[in-house]
Amino acid sequence: MPKGSASGLLLFLCFAFCGWSCNFIPPYSGIKKQNLAGFNTLKVRGAAYSSIDSEFIDVANRPATNSSSQELDRFSSYGLELERLIGNQYSATFSLDSREYHERSSGPPIKGKQIAGGLRRYFGTRALTAFVTAQLQYNFGLELQQEGWESDGFLGWGVGTGLNWALSENFSVETYLMYEGMPDVPSHLVGDNVTSSGFQHNLSGLVGYIALGYHF
């Protein structure tokens, strides 16, 4: 993601969380109101869009001779999310996702599982509601099957914005776009923490999600 775009997104989120959202997000005054049941929402979600760069960084050679960077050919992610209202238009989220990163080569995908905890800020009280979100992610490790490498677990982060549409008192659907970032992560042979691959890996970029929620 270009640095200018990332900076603009972060600036927008800062303003929104500070409560200065009225200049950015319309009040949706033409959309009907829809009350929702309970304080909890259980969701099933999947990735509908991605723009993620796969970077292999050669750290074994100086200068680096085998580093590479390319956009993923395909990305898939599916999981569950639990959301809990914790205040007026604020909520906490916890999610568990399984994901696969498909590169343009024909080899097997890179696999990973992650959990994430975060906060949301909603705007408005009508059926169509905008929100911004930020979360801290923990990935249990990457499985690079083609090369026979794996990584240890690592922390990442995500920020994004989206829309939630209340279909009824108990059901809603939402779509949102999130930039997910991770540090440069080293890898080693599967089952051998001592033998390094000589590479670090980074899989950061934009992910678009669609989720169906049940409110209770």
Image (spheres, grey):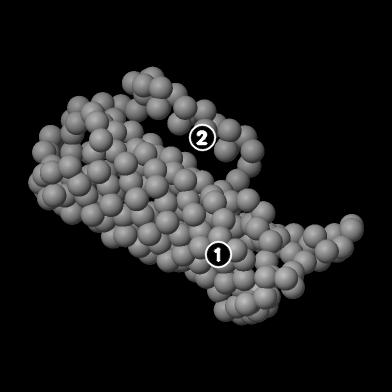
Tell which residue pokes out farthest to the right in this image: 63
Q: Which amino acid does label 2 sit on?
A: Leu
Name the residue located 62 percent from the left edge and 35 percent from the top edge.
4
The label nearer to you, 1 versus 2, is 1
Q: In which quarter of the view is residue 145 placed?
A: bottom right
Is the residue under label 2 in contact with that under label 1 (CB below 8 Å)?
A: no
Q: In which quarter of the view is residue 52 placed?
A: bottom right
In the rendering, at what x and y percent does residue 132 appear? Answer: 38, 36
Which residue matches tag 2? Answer: 9
Residue 152 visible in the snapshot:
yes
As displayed, is residue 44 above or below residue 129? below
In the rendering, at what x and y percent does residue 81 appear? Answer: 31, 54
> Does 42 sit left or right of 153 as displayed?
left
> Does 172 sit left or right of 210 as displayed?
left
Which residue matches tag 1? Answer: 141
At label 2, counting other C-alpha atoms closer than 10 Å, the crowd grade (few under 14, some 14-19, many 20 or more) is some
Name the residue located 62 percent from the left edge and 66 percent from the top edge.
151
Q: Distance between the residues labelled 1 and 2?
A: 28 Å
Q: In which quarter of the view is residue 146 placed?
A: bottom right
Name the residue located 58 percent from the left edge and 33 percent from the top edge.
7
Compare residues 55 and 80 and report the one nearer the observer.
80
In the rendering, at what x and y percent does residue 139 appear? Answer: 51, 59
- Which label belongs to residue 200? none
Name the residue located 24 percent from the left edge and 31 percent from the top edge.
87
Of callouts 1 and 2, which one flags the residue occurring earlier in the amino acid sequence? 2
Q: Which amino acid does label 1 sit on?
A: Gly
Compare residues 83 and 161 and report the one nearer the observer.
83
Q: Tag 1, which secondary structure?
A: loop
Q: Tag 2, which secondary structure?
A: helix
Residue 161 visible in the snapshot:
no
At label 1, counting other C-alpha atoms closer than 10 Å, the crowd grade (few under 14, some 14-19, many 20 or more) is some
